[in-house]
Each structure stands twice: as structure tokens, then as C-alpha cells.
Amino acid sequence: MKISELDNVKSQGTSMDRINVLPDEGVSRFDGMDILSVKQFKHRDLDIIFDVARDMREMVDRQGAVDILKGKLLSNLFYEPSTRTSSSFAAATQRLGGNVIQINNVTFSSVSKGEELRDTIRSMGSYSDAIVLRHPDEGSADIAAEVSEKPIINAGDGIGEHPTQALLDIFTIVEELGTIDGLTVTMLGDLKYGRTVHSLAKLLALYDVKLNFVAPDLLKAPTALVDSLIESGVGPCKHVDLDSIISETDVLYVTRVQQERFVDQSVYEKVNRSYAVNVDTMDIAKERMIVMHPLPRVDEISRAVDKDPRAAYFRQMEYGMYVRMALLALVFGKV
Ligand code: NCD
């Protein structure tokens, strides 16, 4: 269904049956589902999400907003800092005609009185229709989903996963380069603690890609991740030097060092500023390469690169809003 037709759709109510693994096809299968991990998605699901995201972009260009989520309330529950994920979910909900309860600083909520995550989730679920959760503990989204009557969307669980970021990352690549199959994707930075990398690498395994890892020794991708990628047929997934790989890279995915994950800050100091993308890097890169970054950028991409048309990281944010609009429309059963 085209988004232009969505305005006329009568509210169908959202089924609260939990579907954690999507069947092969059918948008109705998204209705009421939790989004916890990229492992839930198959190739066909991504095609559905991206088709709806394109419709969303057209709709926003044309009229800015619709009211298919009128009467729907989203809880944005963030136990960790966020600019883009939190704001883009809020923007997505509001452009679809819904409303948002925003909890950005849990120290001003009952969490500071010692309330357990499960109870906070039950509370937010009794007021709203879906909960977007960011939390420092790996596995927290699964715990939330166990107790929640309403769909949970994982907006980052510690060093675990960030599935909606990975979906928007893939959408960015498809929109910018026209395809994913056949590309060489190089991931640079904190591959140990970066949850965006963990989710994106797993999702890229659904495609025919060559994946390279470039990281300081202390921040290499976890062995379990590398092994699972090799098992899914992505190929060797080696850690290499950026110089040896840059000229054959189609997508350079850069991440910051995740300072907040280091127990010992002296270890962070050892790896901080140990890599950077600058104009010299771009000089030897392909003419059609794109540079992506989930942001925030600290100093791992020099500001001079921002002017280069191959710098896709600011466009990536906008793609993110359309993907999140698509996910919300699908989860609320409006597509
Ligand atoms: C990322 C995150 O929170 O994992 N940011 C984001 O969601 N756009 C990456 C990061 O914080 O480095």
C-alpha cells in the first residue's frame, strides 16, 4: 500500500501477539512485534521496510506529515545519552501523527529511587502503545520484552545490538550506491564495544559482501562475531590495515572509541586518537566510495572531509528518520 493511501485507512487496532522471528513475507507479520536484534530479519523483511521507508520519504517531501498514528503514544525511554536515535524516533512518530513520552534523563525518574527496569517498563507500557528503550546493559531489551505487553524497540543495549541503526545503515548504502551485493565494506574503529558495528555486520551477512575490519589491537571485533560471520558465508572477515584496503573499499563505516565502556580510562587513553580519516585517506579512496558514521563523531573523521560529496554521514541521519517511520508504521499495523 502506498503511503498516500494510508491517510484513508481506518484504525485497525494493534495486535499484541509477539512475533520475534519474522516469517518470510507479509507486512502484517510486523504488527505488534518487538524489534530486539537484527537476527530477527531476513532479506525479504528488509525489502519491505525499505519500500515503506521510500514511501515515507515521498510523503514527507510532499506534505510533511500524515495522521496514521493518531491516538498512538510512543515511550522514548533512554538510560544512556542520545541525540539522533531519540530525536528521530520522536520525529518519526510525530510525522505519522502520533505522540511521544520522552524520558531522556532517568535520574529525574523513579529509576533514581531504585526502580528496576522491569517495573519501569510495565509502567510505561500502561500509558503508551510501544516503548523505545536504550539501556547500558546487554540483554536489557530482551528483559523488557519479557515483561512488556507492548512492543519493545531496542535502541541500543550496552555493547550488544542497535538493530534500527543497522537497518538505516543498510538503507543508506542501498540509496547511495544502488545495491549492497558485490560491495566491499570496511569497518573502522571500535569494533569491540561498538554495538552499531555488531548489528550492521550481522545484517550485512544477509548480502553478498566482502567485509574488512580495521581496529586498534585493543578494539578488535569479538571472536564470536567474526566466527559467526564466517559461518554465515561472509568470507574471511580479516582485521587489516586501512592503507591496504582503502582503494578497494566501497563503504567506509567509521565509529568513535566508545569511551563509556572502558572500566580503566588509561586503556581508553591508549587507543584514543589512534586512527582517523582525513583528506589524504579520501585522496586514495574510490571515487564512488561513501563514508558512513553512526555519529556522534569525535575526531575520527576530520572536519575537512565533511565537504567531500562522498561523506554520507549527515545524509545517513535523514535516511534514519524514514526507516524509523517505516518501522513504526509496520509495528503499529498501519501498512
Ligand atoms: C551510536 C550508539 O549509540 O551506539 N549512536 C547512534 O545511535 N547514532 C554510536 C555511538 O554512540 O558511537
Image (spheres, helix red, strand yellow):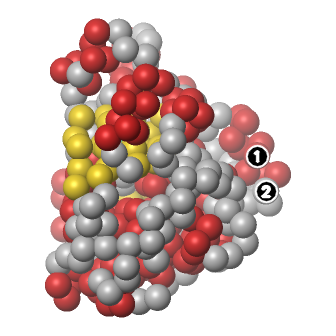
Q: Which residue is disc 2 drawn over?
A: 232
Give the camera-side residue of 107 and 265: 107
Task: State which quadrant residue 262 falls in.
Answer: top left
**Res 241 visible:** no
Residue sitting nearer the eye, 104 or 270: 104
Label 2 sits on what residue type?
Answer: Ser
72, above or below 28, in the image: above
Instruction: Name the residue type under label 1.
Output: Ser
Give coordinates of residue 36: x percent, y percent: 56, 46
- Image height check: is 179 above or below 87? below
The answer to the question of whether label 1 and label 2 lie on touching residues, with beta carbons closer than 8 A, is: yes
Q: Is residue 199 above or below residue 136?
A: below
Residue at 77 percent across and 43 percent down: it is: 227
Q: Position of residue 290 (x, y in %)?
A: 40, 69
Residue 228 — which label? 1
Q: Quadrant of residue 127?
A: top left
In percent of the image, x 23 and y 22: which residue is there? 109
Q: Can the viewer see residue 69 in this picture?
A: yes
State the image coordinates of residue 2 (x, y, percent, origin top left): 41, 89
Q: Is residue 305 left or right of residue 273?
A: left
Element on which disc 2 rests = loop
